[in-house]
Image: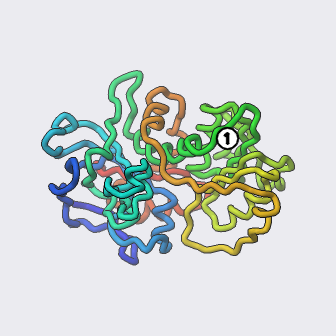
């Protein structure tokens, strides 16, 4: 099969071995024929050395189940998206419902598990979610490929209870920052502001009623109750601290390969709460797309055939570019 591989160098492998479902997997694994895969900032950071990963890239995808294990034949032929953390199910974290922190976990296309930028991918059936078909509640492939990052945006709501009138600043007008701002605006009564420096990207949020502030015009004057840091930069955390009121909270979303020097004194002096935030729940994300509450289509900058994956990554690295997709059918 064709696959996008990073092994110290990003390249398209035309004859990569097709993965086979593991019969020893608890509950069984399915073989999924990938339709679309998205290039995420984490993929770009892996190519820069993040996590030390080598293998097939990709963790944002939608596809069709080609083979299903015994007892799950009903999902064969169905369109699905998949969660990315494969866990043991036996440890204290798994038993406590924190499977994404299982010490034995592998992470699709990020850690110890080949990803979905390929014609086929395997995943345990308990990590697959069927994408609704039909109209008006149907979700297109172009929308479904956003389920994983949209779920990461919904994770913020799982971790923080936002009250009416809370002042929330989302830092970063990239893909994740936009999704977070849109989710907060739609599903909370907080006062949401998006901080960025690309007018065209911020306008996507503005059309949904999100306030925006261009960083080229200086730092926002109002201290915020919450700052969601989604800049994708090593400097974002320090900037977030400077925008919080005393006893405010910062929610960290960025994963970067580059390190950064940090002045931790403001955290102590201002009694700041720091919350790390990673993966999130798929069902609210799928429902938001099916109910047309969140429109992700304006976030698509380009779609490339898998044969042009290297060129697609070059575009995805450019400033001002949002989501770049890889189409396995072209």
Locate residue 246 relative to residue 36 in the image: left or right. Answer: right
Q: In which quarter of the image is residue 180?
A: top right
Instruction: Check the image and name the residue furthest to the top.
Output: 136
The reply to whether residue 155 is visible in this rendering is yes
Please state the horizontal and vertical placement of residue 110, each as a whole percent of the image.
40, 64
Instruction: Check the image and name the residue furthest to the right.
Output: 221
Please state the horizontal and vertical placement of residue 228, each as a whole percent of the image.
66, 50
Locate residue 49 relative to residue 29 in the image: left or right. Answer: right
Screen quadrant of the N terminus: bottom left
Please state the horizontal and vertical placement of residue 17, each as a whole percent of the image.
19, 65
The reply to whether residue 304 is visible in this rendering is no
Point 40% across, 59% down: residue: 102
301 above or below 207?
Answer: below
Instruction: Check the image and name the residue furthest to the bottom.
Output: 8
Point 66% across, 55% down: residue: 229
Point 56% across, 50% down: residue: 175
- Looking at the picture, tell me which residue is in the foreground, 206 or 221: 221
Please state the horizontal and vertical placement of residue 274, each as a whole percent of the image.
66, 57
Instruction: Check the image and name the residue furthest to the left.
Output: 70
Q: Quadrant of residue 191?
A: top right
Which residue is labeled 1 in the image? 203
- Looking at the picture, tell me which residue is in the foreground, 140 or 58: 58
* Circle 1 SS class: helix
Point 31% across, 41% down: residue: 80
128 above or below 230?
Answer: above
| Mark 1 Cα-neighbour bin, 10 Å: few <14, some 14–19, many ≥20 | some
Q: In which quarter of the image is residue 24?
A: bottom left
Locate residue 82 relative to residue 226 in the image: left or right. Answer: left
């Amino acid at each position: 099969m064709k696959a996008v591989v990073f092994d110290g160098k990003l390249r398209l492998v035309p004859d990569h071995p097709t993965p086979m479902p593991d019969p020893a997997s608890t509950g069984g694994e399915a073989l999924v024929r990938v339709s679309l895969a998205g290039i995420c900032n984490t993929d770009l950071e892996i190519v820069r050395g993040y996590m030390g990963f080598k293998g097939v890239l990709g963790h944002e995808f939608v596809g069709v189940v080609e083979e299903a294990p015994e007892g799950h034949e009903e999902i064969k032929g169905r369109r699905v998206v998949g969660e990315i953390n494969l866990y043991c199910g036996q440890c204290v974290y798994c038993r406590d419902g924190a499977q994404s922190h299982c010490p034995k976990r592998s992470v699709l296309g990020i850690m110890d598990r080949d990803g979905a930028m390929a014609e086929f991918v395997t995943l345990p059936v308990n990590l697959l979610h069927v994408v609704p078909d039909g109209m008006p509640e149907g979700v297109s492939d172009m929308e479904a490929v956003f389920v994983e990052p949209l779920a990461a945006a919904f994770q913020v709501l799982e971790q923080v209870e936002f009250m009416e009138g809370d002042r929330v600043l989302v830092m970063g007008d990239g893909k994740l920052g936009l999704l977070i701002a849109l989710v907060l605006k739609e599903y909370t009564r907080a006062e949401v502001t998006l901080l960025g420096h690309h007018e065209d990207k911020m306008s996507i949020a503005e059309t949904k009623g999100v306030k925006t502030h261009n960083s080229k015009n200086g730092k926002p004057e109002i201290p915020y109750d919450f700052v969601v840091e989604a800049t994708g930069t090593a400097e974002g955390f320090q900037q977030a601290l400077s925008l919080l009121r005393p006893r405010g909270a910062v929610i960290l979303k960025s994963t970067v390969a580059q390190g950064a020097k940090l002045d931790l004194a403001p955290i102590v002096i201002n009694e700041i709460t720091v919350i790390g935030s990673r993966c999130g729940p798929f069902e609210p994300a799928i429902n938001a797309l099916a109910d047309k509450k969140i429109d992700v289509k304006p976030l698509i900058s380009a779609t490339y055939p898998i044969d042009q994956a290297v060129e697609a990554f070059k575009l995805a690295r450019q400033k001002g570019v949002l989501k770049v997709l890889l189409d396995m059918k072209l």
